Image (cartoon, coloured by chain):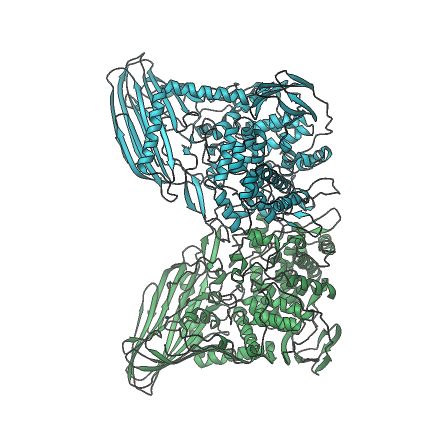
Chain colours: A cyan, B green
Amino acid sequence: MSLPFRGYECSPWELRWRGLAVDQLQRTESTFALSNGHIGVRGTLEEGEPRGLPGTYLNGFYEEHELPYAEAGYGYPEAGQTVVNVTDGKVIRMLVEDEPFDMRYGSATAHDRVLDFRTGTLTRTTEWESPTGRRVRVRTQRLVSFTQRAVVAIRYEVEPLEDDLQLVLQSDLLANEPIESDAGDPRVAAALQCPLESEFTYAQHYRAALVHRTKRSGLRMAAAMDHQIESPDGLRTEIAVENDLARLTVAVDVPRGKRVRLTKFLGYGWSAQRSIPALRAQVDAALAGALQTGWDGLLAEQKAFLDDFWDTADIQIDGDPELQQATRFALFHVLQAGARGESRAIPGKGLTGPGYDGHAFWDTESFVLPVLTYTMPEAARDALRWRHSTLDKARDRARQLGLRGAAFPWRSINGAECSAYWPAGTAAFHVSADIADAVARYLAATEDREFERTCGTEMLVETARLWMSLGHYDSHGRFRIDGVTGPDEYSAVADNNVYTNLMAARNLREAAASCERIPQVARALEATEHELGTWREAADRMLIPYDRELGVHPQSEGFTEHADWDFAGTPQRNYPLLLNYPYFDLYRKQVVKQADLVLALHLCGDAFTPEEKTRDFAYYEERTVRDSSLSAGTQAVVAAEVGHLELAYDYLGEAALTDLRDVHNNVRNGLHMASLAGAWNGVVAGFGGMRDHNGKLAFAPRLPPQLSRIEFRMCLRDSRFAVEVHAERATYRLLSGKPVEITHHGKACTVSEEPLSLPIPVLDPGPPPRQPTGREPSRRKPEHIRRPAGAARESTPG
Amino acid sequence: MSLPFRGYECSPWELRWRGLAVDQLQRTESTFALSNGHIGVRGTLEEGEPRGLPGTYLNGFYEEHELPYAEAGYGYPEAGQTVVNVTDGKVIRMLVEDEPFDMRYGSATAHDRVLDFRTGTLTRTTEWESPTGRRVRVRTQRLVSFTQRAVVAIRYEVEPLEDDLQLVLQSDLLANEPIESDAGDPRVAAALQCPLESEFTYAQHYRAALVHRTKRSGLRMAAAMDHQIESPDGLRTEIAVENDLARLTVAVDVPRGKRVRLTKFLGYGWSAQRSIPALRAQVDAALAGALQTGWDGLLAEQKAFLDDFWDTADIQIDGDPELQQATRFALFHVLQAGARGESRAIPGKGLTGPGYDGHAFWDTESFVLPVLTYTMPEAARDALRWRHSTLDKARDRARQLGLRGAAFPWRSINGAECSAYWPAGTAAFHVSADIADAVARYLAATEDREFERTCGTEMLVETARLWMSLGHYDSHGRFRIDGVTGPDEYSAVADNNVYTNLMAARNLREAAASCERIPQVARALEATEHELGTWREAADRMLIPYDRELGVHPQSEGFTEHADWDFAGTPQRNYPLLLNYPYFDLYRKQVVKQADLVLALHLCGDAFTPEEKTRDFAYYEERTVRDSSLSAGTQAVVAAEVGHLELAYDYLGEAALTDLRDVHNNVRNGLHMASLAGAWNGVVAGFGGMRDHNGKLAFAPRLPPQLSRIEFRMCLRDSRFAVEVHAERATYRLLSGKPVEITHHGKACTVSEEPLSLPIPVLDPGPPPRQPTGREPSRRKPEHIRRPAGAARESTPG
């Protein structure tokens, strides 16, 4: 390779990587992944190799496997689920005068790839000289359509640069692609070798289709491709199909100055129930639609869809171009994860990689859905509809655990619990309160009574019933919830986790309120006045432990009496701690993986006084190691609230750049959706001070000195509005719809078309809190802000 | 089969089962198992079939296997260990005029088997008629020698009853015997198919040997056999050997009134290091010794050994013949498990079956060693030497867990932790205090300074250091031990478990005392005066939680605030609860599997007032379901102490009869050594009121009304003495050695040759405590006492 490694370039509306670094391919395959929430295609090169970890995913399509236990226990899930790398349709190989186009051979004089946040496309431009000296320019562009959810389209153009050349293109559908496992790390998906069994193949003219079925889960999928070819005369094509491979071969002599252009349309579909002919028809129909719209039409639809999104959701940041880029990158990927899921889950990695086995966690409801609720509420609704569709499984799980109501799983693809380690899985019952919270937030933000009637009330009622059966009154009449695990994964199975208890109380109150709004559903669910009364009473009498001596809330009962972690004696190489210390040791000491009590300070901020927040935040800052990507965004939010704005700025930088900087060294397995969502939270809830307790929107904006201005946009019901923050003033203005009632630093006001400019009160936060040695967030220094992210990591060509 | 099923007969010095019930064979294979602590041979019929679960075990001989985890964590053990069914030498098959002798065919006119506690033999007498009407009487007797630890001997006699008969005997050494797995229950050993690889075979004249090696653990074993034959003339013999089979075939015509008598001597040995020739030589030498002693000599040695044991250890019970038998049965099996282990573990099932994978647990030190300490102290010493031999592994484990000192494993064969579920394994650190307690008890009872110098002090010091690194001082200067699991397996990972903290305090004090007794060892271990001071201070300041409102000790901090278990809503079929409820639910509620706080009341009784004991016992009685065989014996002891003598009597009955009645429905996998030891504890510590806090022997005898008299014997240092208890008086008398200082109901006195008869004070215990519905111990009713145990379970022939 003759190109220097450059890394990402800093640019407000795109992510560009110039040059090729083979050892970085897995990372860029994740960051350059395209998805519409239904189909996900990793950013692998069209020619298939060199590659990191190829992946094409269909949301909800998984294979089952046994969960092994050396010592099993009652109620342990027996079957695991793993996202399957489905039939790969993006493969287009090329021979240049009999030389395979492979960037590991010959030399590339130019190579760059661009993910464009406004067009929703990944574009690649490569100038390559073959080992025998033939030069070509290859330009590809691909999209996963937001508007036609079953469709992927790729345009592949080749141009000889000096000589007339014979070119052979091979456009494939490839099933059971061999992939390497990255075992040894539990966060990496268990590799599934050859998960698909061929059921049907078809090939004719430029079109082919493959239908497969998974061996154990019995899910059926179909992939079909069709092509349009523009080329000089003398084209020869051939189509062939085998069980796991369909291939259109195109051979043509291309004179210098001419080019060949292949446009490939892909249709994908899967079903647990539909027959082979039905699925085949479905993907053929998707292709028919795509062909009718055409490549330019698909591009135009994609752009229009994104224009609308950015009009509702854009964030502008003045004073930190890298953060500006990272924030839009984050919003773009959150959109990709959720846009067209349509009653499927939003996995922890979206559809960008096989990490976490493709499972969805509470991350979705607690981090991703707040973003979508205020930027693309129909996507939030669809994700909650997925949860609703799994309610029977959650009810069954609750029964199996001896509980009432619904116990949603810690991790799952199809709604059944897949967690094989219950102290950090099943015991984390807060997931059900998180789902209820997301339902309540969506309902308050949209007043979508149709969703409430068909899904929302039932979800709130069944989760409320879970809490009533999980908790009990002690001899002092306090409602206790014992032996559960809160958000912090370095603690487990403790009594009265503050976050859990506060969220459960909210769940109980919201369930009662929803039942009163939709009495006919309440009746159908047999939720009586008396039952509603028991929910409200339990919420009112919920035990919230408090350490009077220290003046702080223990994360769970007894936490503040536990031994301190020996941070001074913990070398940096021993992080993340879970890979170097036993759970036993982590659980019994005051060491926090991720915001837990601090997450309560954010999401249940109305339960704490400002002074409590300041003391609690300082206490947990000293004990939080941030070994989880879920943490920095929340720390940014609460740091901003208590006035530590520079600290908030550092945390926001970390959250927003988690994947671009590969902070956790695992971006190869996919992006961290919650962390990306954390960028939005850090800006909107952090520097914007947005809170939505009790369904009312409050703002308390404040900027760190490094930023001269931020502006963010939100939607609420049918209105859209913008909040622009400068150092001393914030301006609210309605973009469309009816005026919106909010508070600004505690004062009620109305956002209307006339910009409302209000002063920002000064807050003296006192001395900044400390973090464990070596676990401080990186300070965002001026050089980070001015220079592109990759520039600091110059390296030799891969 | 023409014999009625009879079950066990009641008899003071033997266990006899008349008749054959094929479906009961697995049970009797366990109860009729013979062992000397080095070799174990299950009570399978000589002809191999019908059978339950054949098994021949060598203490410490195991195969390794991977421990699978769906979600692994740092410090999880990777390799499991499973006891191996080694080369079976007890097989002697017979053809009676071409008909295989098989009790499933033809008919048996008599069949009984007797385990004799005084001769240490298993005898069988069978009269059988073949399907073609040939009748024989078969009499076999076998022993596993207490005096020649590598030797098993079997005498096999056959006598034609009506006709002259041709008999063919086949005496085998059989390796890799196929055995059935009983998977699905985690308590059952993972079956290992064909674990042995042949390394050497040999056969000549009447002798043969097989040497094998395990595939993964790389342990080598040898088994050899030799024979003596007494028969009418015309004998034809043949010996043959294959990799997994050596066989002596004996064919002879036996006239009516004559008999053939085969005496089979077996030698066993194993080693992790010795070569094939060395091991072969070892088993040949064992055979040479056995042949030189001869069958009658082995029988005589066995009898003499047992005479001495009973002279030291016998328990007499007047008024309950079944309990009398069960208690001697229990003592006999405890002796078999420990007599000649010689620096190997005493597994939870002894060498009677593959249950618990053949692992040793804390059961050994906390239940079995107290019995051996006061009845066969050299066996207690040898078991503790095994623990000492694993000290390096325990040190390594502590390091791996981030701790100092030594962390002994929850379950193991070779000393390495094999527990795959850390909340109920590794976190149960009390095992190290239990070992320290057993060391301290042994030292106090024997004053064995040689053991203390070579092993004891080091074990006490390293376990004391474990506690110092596990605990910490809170802001009030109390020493806390957080996040550990106590004895009760229905709770886990809790703070300040009272049992653990009290035992840790004792451990710390005993370590300091031992260092002062053996200063040269203390110096070698770098245990300074200052360090001893820190141990004593931590012991003095140990936090013992107490619930002032309820006036009881919580098992661990917060326990008494947890929800009650819904016993009324728990059907009896749902016991044991762990098979029907998730750990999650069990851990967070007030439901107790086995004595935990109540075990503290027994072993750390000096830390409680009598009133506290009464209240605590009543409180935990209401919450203890006794799903563990470790519990009834301890409940018997404490029930007796607080004056509930009839309840103590019921619990003693349950403990003593756990295996004979198959209370836990798993005796097929081996006997419960701790429960058998619990019979001794129930009598000696229960009705004898024996305590040994601080190394001083105290007695507080009291009989339940059902028993007219008990007498038990003990040894202390070089003395033996007997305690005879009647309703109103107890009599102490020295049997040999120097006078012994004791207390009787709190009053100091001296046991000398002159019997000392003292009155028993009356105690009004108040109303009896309640147990969870349906979990009361069975009342021992008069019909139980008078009739044989099996009589109540009459059934049709198997």
In the image: residue A113, left or right of residue A771: left
Q: Against B582, is A633 above or below?
A: above
- Measuring from the top left, give residue A75's x and y in whole percent: 50, 51
> Which quarter of the rendering shows the N terminus of chain A?
top left
Residue lying at the far top in this picture: please name it. A257
- Measuring from the top left, give residue B348's x and y in whole percent: 53, 64
In the image: residue A239, left or right of residue A393: left
- Measuring from the top left, give residue A504's x and y in whole percent: 62, 42
> What number of labels is visible?
0
Q: Residue at x 41, y 70 (%)?
A: B23
Instruction: Tell me the quarter of the picture where residue B167 sits.
Output: bottom left
Q: Against B229, is A483 above or below?
A: above
* Closer to us: A364 or A26: A364
Q: Residue at x 50, y 39 (%)?
A: A388
- Measuring from the top left, give residue A224's x and y in whole percent: 33, 30
Q: Against A246, is B229 above or below?
A: below
In the image: residue A408, left or right of residue B708: left
* Residue A424 visible in the displayed image: yes
Q: Against B13, is A764 above or below?
A: above
* Closer to us: B413 or B563: B563
